[in-house]
Amino acid sequence: MAKLKQRVSYRQKEGLSVDMFTREELAQIHLATLRVLNEAGVKIYNDEALNVFSDGGCKVDRSEKIVRIPQYVLEECIRSAPSSVLLAGRDPKHDRVLETNRVSWTNFGSGIKIYDVNTGILRGTTTQDVRDTALLVDYLDNVDVYSQAVVARDTPKEKEDLIAAEAFLTNTSKHCHHIDLQSGKSAKKFIEMGAAIAGGMDELKKRPIISALICPTSPLQISKEGCDIIMEFAKAEVPINILSMALSGGTAPITIDGTLVVHNAEVLAGIVLTQLVNKGAPVIYGSSTATFDMKTGTASVGSPELGMISACVACLAQFYNLPSYTAGG
């Protein structure tokens, strides 16, 4: 335990908080995660990422596309990841810093249907809905960051993510968090859009007015496209949110602590990739992990367990001294 404390810091919270774990219990989840990453590993469907992991000291089985991450590699990458991340607004009054003891709020996304208040009909979402939701969030004082709220389903699928980006970037002065990028190529274009608004890549690095999210595929996989997006953002030094959506009883163990180990392994594998690509690249420890309703076959996003899981995830992020992003339910 003494060695663990030297490697991974835990900062005591101040003020009102919900402590789901003792320090010893957090250490147990960390040690279980180390075992999963070092023995079972994570499946990586991207040859370039496999090379990055291999060059960084990880054990790579190329035939099975399995990456096993040793403890020393993992903890060095945790140390090199920034403990705070600036989510800058186009208007500096909307700047938000993600770090321990600071809480900000964003909207949920990305919806594919919307209730049309003018017609009373539930319909598919459009580019105009992307514009409207961005404008609404821009007006709301209690929402700090715009996350892509809905999908532009009236556009060609291969251009949907960038058309949506143009729609929300031009309708809010708050930070824009893209949660539906489809490829590394789209990620690069989105970063270029952000740089054009910020005044160049150097200015975007100083004041990142955009960020993005990728989800590992539970259990313990990261897709080719997910790896490409992670690597593009790490190279550009623009914040990337590694957000697991593990489901207790579905894609993860049915117990909350077992789910947290799978969740933790997936997120940390993504964080390791960012740091091996570019040491010090801004990264966010994310979660929309929830429980699986076996009766309906759906994710129980509004369940009490989701709130418990999100509180646990925040504790884990603080254990690693990393900024976090969790689902509210």
Image: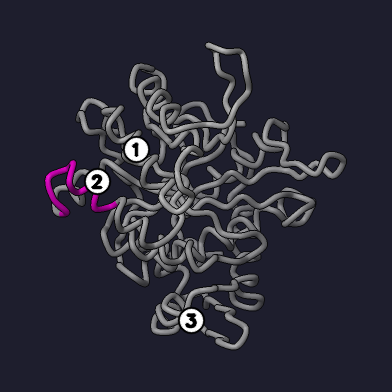
Residue 160 is tagged as none
Residue 200 located within the stretch drawn in magenta: yes
Quickly name the residue at label 2. 194
Quadrant assignment for the N terminus: bottom right
How many angstroms separate mark 3 from mark 1 (CA)?
34 Å
- Marks 2 and 1: in contact by CB < 8 Å? yes
Q: Is residue 295 left or right of residue 272?
A: right
- Front residue of 257/183: it is 183
Instruction: Mark 2 or mark 3: name the one nearer the start of the chain.
Output: 3
Residue at figure coordinates x 65%, y 59% from the top left: 218
Residue at figure coordinates x 54%, y 66% from the top left: 223
- Front residue of 57/162: it is 162
Q: Is residue 221 above or below residue 52?
A: above
Residue 176 is tagged as 1
Residue at figure coordinates x 26%, y 28% from the top left: 173
Query: For numbered disc 2, what is the local secondary structure?
Result: helix
Quickly name the residue at label 3. 58
- Front residue of 84/162: it is 162
Quadrant assignment for the C terminus: top right
Residue kind at label 2, given as amino acid type: Gly
Task: State which region is magenta.
Answer: 191-201
Residue 319 percent location from the top left of the image? 50, 51
Q: Is residue 224 above or below residue 194?
A: below
How packed mark 2 is, by other alpha carbons closer than 10 Å (few <14, some 14-19, many 20 or more), is: many
Q: Nearer the viewer, mark 3 or mark 1?
A: 1
Residue kind at label 3, given as amino acid type: Cys
Q: Nearer the viewer, mark 2 or mark 3?
A: 2
Residue 185 percent location from the top left of the image? 36, 61
